[in-house]
Structure formats: C-alpha cells, structure tokens
Image (spheres, rainbow, N blue to C red):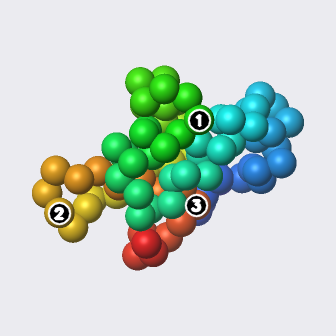
Amino acid sequence: MDPLSGKPIWKTEDLIEIAMEEPELELLRLVDGKRSLYDVCTRGPFSPAENARIIYAYHVLHLIRRRVAERPGVVKLRLRSEPAGSG
C-alpha cells in the first residue's frame, strides 16, 4: 500500500507473477462492488467455502474491502483501489 494514498502499489501482472494463479485471479475479478459476498462465493471457481476463505485472505491482504450496502444484511465487496463513491 502506498502510505499517502492508501491505494495498492501493484498491478494485476504483479499479482500473477508473485503467486496468484488464474482461478484465484478469476475470483478476484468477480469482486466489482456490485455483487454480494454470496454471489461472489457461489460464482467463483472453487467451492463456495473455499471461495469464502480466499475472499477473506484478500480482505486481510487489503486487496479488497467491505462496502456498506444499501440493503441491511447484504455485504458487498469492491477492489481496494476503487473510490468510495463508485459502484
């Protein structure tokens, strides 16, 4: 993370090079700020439980962050680099 802006300082290509395999990158691409956590976990390339574990790892690594949804009880996710007002 860039300490001043709080934005990621890596590119998608860097993620692939360091350790991310295609299915994991596919799961990350599902995170768009519009899909719910349930949608991402059920549409991902792995089992829903495994997708949830990987999504949690992305959150811990600050690749994604939780967005407060308009509807109570719905969790939406977005890439860390997206501005707060987008999506």
Residue found at x 43% / y 72%:
87
- Rounded to the nearest angstrom, the CA distance separating label 2 from label 3 is 23 Å
Q: Amino acid at mark 3?
A: Ser
Q: Position of residue 64 (x, y in %)?
A: 50, 48
Three-letter amino acid code at the position of disc 1:
Pro
Indicate which label's residue lies in the foreground, 3 or 1. 1
Vertically, is 50 above or below 62?
above
Looking at the image, tell me whether mark 1 or mark 2 is earlier in sequence order: 1
Pointer 1: what residue? 45
Whether 57 is drawn above or below 68: the answer is above
Q: Which mark is residue 71?
A: 2
Residue in front for this viewpoint, 84 or 43: 43
According to the picture, the residue beneath numbered tag 3 turns out to be: 81
Of badges 2 and 3, the one in the foreground is 2
For residue 10, side relative to residue 84 (left or right): right
Residue lying furthest bottom in this view? 85
Tell me which corner region of the image, top left, top right, bottom left or bottom right, holds residue 26: top right
Query: Does residue 51 appear to the left or right of 21 in the view shown?
Result: left
Residue in view at x 51 percent, y 53 percent: 31
N-terminal of the pair, mark 3 or mark 1, is: 1
